[in-house]
């Protein structure tokens, strides 16, 4: 079996997920033993439009981004969304809580009308094209990424958890943030990161997006019992899950 | 410290034994036919309706019904539908390659003793034919031991029909009655159109001496069972095979549990009388 | 076999001697809670703990463990046979461990769990401080009679160490300053047991646990399942923190050669949405209420029918762990009884 050719493309993002790939260090050699990178701006100078797998990093924020993404989709057999910006729109979706004009003025002031600063509502990759595989998280988890790469090299569907983060906190023996009366989004967020934030004493920010069928109504209902408000919950959900079904926080 | 204890591996029920792929060929768009032989040369020793855990290193392990009859010596057969990550690897297997096998596990259709002398009606929907085929061959290989044999087979479309050669051969026999239907026909199909229950009024059974063996998608059971009752069969005369997620096959992992029943150990084949009152069994 | 009495100072000296020659997992403080962890000094041991945050099952069925190592089609069994001492197990958790040993060894013997169980020396300890949700008294598990190698009971300022097994005796041999317990000591110990039976009742089950199967037999269609499940996150916390939940998932990890790796099992739970799903998409317990009911039936009916004991030992961890506050078995079972 010949090695699948991989191209990595970035859209609106901090490029931190690509950096996570670079951070694989020695494992990078293992990585290129199963796939062949052909286009990767952050790590190599060559470019090639002939690839099997496209890794998309970043969210889609301009009309020309959509065209570029569609062209990539056409060329790739498998399209992978890499990191929260690509999988769910991520932090960039905070913008969608405001009017576009307001956003532009806030950021660019008087220069807001310059044509190259044109912007649109933020979209995750799957709001534009079909996505075959998701590498969730901000940043993505290296271990999960290597699991996904190996799976793709084997022609197998990667196993991505479909349960909430609580499972991983319990597996690790991490004390629940609700024990301290704090909101933690782990109860509605997809696991797979091995819950590093709660184990470090932080609440789950929800960067991996909602678990399937999240019970957000239950989350609203329980706020009162912890002397918290639905607004507290919504403000936390906004960071990574702005304008996401099913809450529209 | 963990040790790799080869000496205890004969006691570790999670360690599969190697088997060689003798044949691997596509059947339909989704299903693949595979024939295996245990590397040790021993017979698998299953009965119709039982399953094995098939493992493919790096892909994982999944349960599959055995589709061949124990009357066929030297190898065993399976039909694998491509629906998950283990099956995607299985679909690429070629003759000569190796897999791991644990089992056989579970209960079987009582063709060996319980059903001798009775009329038997097989009612299969889609890939429900896969485990039942084992029982059909067993019965036909011991044809004189049984009364009338009927095979009712329904599929969504003509293209999804499995074992079409064998179905045709069974149709040819004058000691077997075969009725087939598809939910939705096409140009190639001149037979019955309709769900499997539309076949039931077309057969005449001696209800007091008939056993029905039923296997198909979850939605099928309730409807078929109602109609079998209408025909005069009782729960004691109906055998079903239940599909569940039998992850370990050993009655431990919990995935296949239906109320208090572990399908991998107490099933997958049940007499309907045993599970009629089990609320989650037939949906 | 025997019962020795030793002062708290002697107990500490004894524990340090055990640590010197054994791998010891002991109950210790973790933030403002308690957890079992490798013990390096007797001074870290907290026999006054209220409840271990994670149940001791984690040392017999780790959250993730390797079952089999494979290289191509060659598979070899991986069995952990490293002896260890588990120090400070509360009676209700001891009852749970006894149940687990029964379940993992019956029918299909599981060498992975059972090897650890056989290698373990378990030092149980009667409860000194009651956790906020413990109801072991109602479940008959405030006190335990068997399964441990040593049972420690604090009586006044001293401890009684009741060693029952060869493994227990081996540890007891390391005691330096101790004396045989007197009848008076044993009377005092019985008083501790009686008191604990009264004290470990933060919630009061209105029936005996052995009546649960019969009650549940009649309660399948009770509205409580739908009502409570409406608030369920399907997060599995009540399963995973339960000392008698042992369901698991199995997955293959593969090395970069794409040929060798490990088959691993990990804690799983029947409250997780896709637990009863099959390849192809059908989910046999797709509704929250069905999953919610399954857990109560497993604890109160299915497992008791299998091993003859209630699978809820009253540790109360699920009550504390449930963010939505719907996991209290006492609330649910009492409600069923009221509406009977």
Image: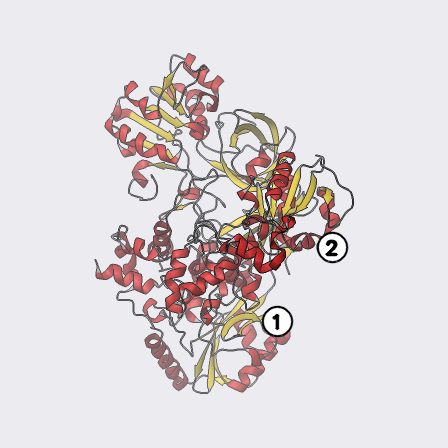
Q: Chain of mark 2?
A: A
The reply to whether the C-beta atoms of the residues labelled 2 and 1 are less than 8 Å apart is no
Q: Is residue C94 left or right of residue B274?
A: right
Q: Front-most of A122 and C137?
A: A122
Crowdedness near tag 1: few (<14), some (14–19) or many (≥20) residues, C-alpha within 10 Å: few
Q: Residue at x 36, y 37 (%)?
A: B270
Q: Is residue B64 above or below residue B155?
A: below
Q: Residue A1: x, y in percent?
A: 70, 34
* Residue beneath disc 1: C22
Q: Nearer the viewer, residue A213 or B179?
A: A213
In the displayed structure, would residue A240 be above or below residue C18? above
Query: What is the crowding at mark 2: few (fewer than 14 residues within 10 Å), some, or many (at least 20)?
Result: few
Give me the residue at 21% from left, 59% from top.
C339
Chain letter behind tag 1: C
Q: Which secondary structure, mark 1?
A: loop
Q: Please state if C147 lies on the left or on the right of B196 as rendered.
A: right
Looking at this view, name the residue that lies furthest to the right. A45
Image depth: mark 2 or mark 1 in front: 2
Residue A217 in view (yes/no): yes
Checking the image for residue C310, the label placed there is none
Which secondary structure lies at badge 2? loop
Q: Are marks 2 and 1 on the same chain?
A: no
Task: Give the numbered dot on residue A25.
Answer: 2
Residue B89: image quadrant is top right
Residue nearest the viewer, comparing B211 with A6: A6
- Marks 2 and 1, Cα distance to the nearest angstrom? 38 Å
């Amino acid at each position: 079996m010949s090695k699948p050719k991989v191209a990595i493309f970035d859209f609106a993002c901090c490029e931190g997920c690509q950096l996570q790939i670079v951070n694989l260090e020695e494992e990078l050699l293992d990585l290129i033993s199963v796939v062949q990178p052909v286009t990767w701006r952050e790590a190599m100078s060559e470019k090639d439009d002939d690839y099997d797998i496209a890794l998309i990093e970043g969210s889609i924020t301009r009309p020309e981004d959509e065209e570029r993404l569609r062209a990539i989709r056409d060329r790739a057999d498998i399209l992978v969304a890499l990191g929260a910006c690509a999988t769910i729109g991520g932090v960039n979706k905070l913008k969608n809580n405001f009017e576009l004009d307001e956003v532009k003025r806030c950021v660019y002031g008087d220069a807001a009308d310059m044509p190259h600063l044109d912007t649109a509502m933020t979209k995750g990759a799957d709001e534009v094209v079909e996505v075959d595989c998701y590498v969730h998280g901000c940043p993505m988890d290296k271990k999960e990424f290597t699991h996904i790469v190996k799976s793709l090299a084997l022609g197998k569907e990667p196993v991505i958890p479909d349960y909430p983060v609580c499972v991983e906190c319990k597996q690790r023996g991490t004390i629940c943030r609700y024990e301290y009366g704090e909101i933690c989004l782990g109860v509605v967020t997809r696991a797979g990161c091995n819950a590093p934030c709660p184990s470090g004493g932080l609440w789950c920010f929800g960067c991996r997006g909602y678990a399937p069928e999240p019970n957000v109504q239950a989350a609203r209902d329980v706020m009162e019992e912890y002397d918290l408000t639905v607004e507290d919950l919504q403000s936390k959900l906004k960071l990574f899950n702005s304008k996401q079904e099913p809450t529209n926080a | 410290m963990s040790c790799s204890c080869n000496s205890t591996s004969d006691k570790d029920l999670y360690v599969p034994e190697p088997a060689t792929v003798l044949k691997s060929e596509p059947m339909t768009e989704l299903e693949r036919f595979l024939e295996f032989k245990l590397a040790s040369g021993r017979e698998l020793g299953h009965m119709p309706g039982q399953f094995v855990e098939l493992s493919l290193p790096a892909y994982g392990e999944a349960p599959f019904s055995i589709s061949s009859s124990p009357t066929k010596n030297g190898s065993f057969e399976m039909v694998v539908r491509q629906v998950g990550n283990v099956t995607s690897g299985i679909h690429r297997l070629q003759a000569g390659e190796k897999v791991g096998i644990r089992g056989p596990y579970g209960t079987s259709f009582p063709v060996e003793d319980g059903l001798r002398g009775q009329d038997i009606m097989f009612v299969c929907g889609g890939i429900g034919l896969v485990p039942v085929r084992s029982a059909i061959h067993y019965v036909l290989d011991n044809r004189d031991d049984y009364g009338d044999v009927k095979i009712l087979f329904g599929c969504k479309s003509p293209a999804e029909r499995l074992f079409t050669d064998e179905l045709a051969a069974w149709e040819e026999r004058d000691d077997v009655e075969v009725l087939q239907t598809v939910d939705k026909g096409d140009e190639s199909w001149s037979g019955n159109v309709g769900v499997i229950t539309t076949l039931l009024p077309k057969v005449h059974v001696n209800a007091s001496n008939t056993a029905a063996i039923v296997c198909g998608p979850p939605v099928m059971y309730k409807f078929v069972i109602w109609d079998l009752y209408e025909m005069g069969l009782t729960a004691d005369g109906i055998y079903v095979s239940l599909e569940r997620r039998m992850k370990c096959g050993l009655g431990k992992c919990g995935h296949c549990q239906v109320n208090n029943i572990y399908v991998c150990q107490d099933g997958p084949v049940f007499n309907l009388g045993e599970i009629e009152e089990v609320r989650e069994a037939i949906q | 076999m025997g019962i020795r009495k030793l002062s708290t100072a002697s107990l500490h000296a004894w524990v340090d001697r055990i640590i010197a020659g054994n791998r010891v997992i002991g109950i210790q403080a973790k933030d403002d809670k308690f957890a079992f962890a490798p013990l390096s000094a007797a001074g870290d041991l907290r026999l006054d703990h209220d409840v271990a945050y994670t149940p001791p099952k984690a040392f017999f069925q780790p959250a993730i463990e390797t079952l089999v190592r494979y290289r191509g089609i060659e598979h070899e069994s991986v069995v952990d046979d490293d002896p260890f001492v588990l120090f400070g197990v509360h009676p209700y958790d001891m009852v749970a461990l006894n149940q687990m040993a029964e379940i993992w060894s019956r029918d299909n013997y599981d060498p992975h769990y059972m090897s650890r169980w056989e290698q373990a020396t378990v030092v149980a300890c009667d409860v000194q401080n009651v956790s906020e949700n413990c109801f072991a008294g109602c479940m008959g598990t405030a006190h335990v009679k068997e399964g441990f190698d040593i049972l420690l009971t604090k009586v006044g300022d001293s401890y009684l160490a009741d060693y029952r097994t060869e493994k227990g005796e081996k540890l007891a041999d390391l005691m330096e300053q101790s004396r045989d317990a007197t009848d008076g000591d044993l009377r005092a110990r019985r008083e501790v047991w009686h008191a604990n039976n009264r004290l470990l009742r933060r919630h009061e089950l209105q029936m005996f646990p052995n009546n649960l199967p019969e009650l549940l037999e009649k309660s399948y269609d009770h509205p409580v399942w739908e009502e409570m499940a409406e608030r369920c996150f399907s997060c599995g916390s009540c399963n995973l923190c339960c000392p008698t939940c042992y369901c698991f998932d199995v997955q293959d990890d593969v090395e970069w050669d794409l040929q060798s790796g490990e088959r691993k099992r990990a804690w799983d739970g029947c409250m997780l949405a896709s637990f009863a799903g099959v390849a192809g998409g059908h989910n046999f317990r797709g509704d929250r209420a069905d999953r919610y009911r399954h857990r109560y039936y497993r604890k109160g009916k299915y497992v008791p029918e299998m091993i003859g004991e209630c699978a809820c030992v009253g540790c109360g961890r699920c009550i504390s762990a449930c963010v939505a506050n719907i996991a209290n078995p006492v609330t649910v079972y009492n409600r069923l009884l009221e509406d009977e």
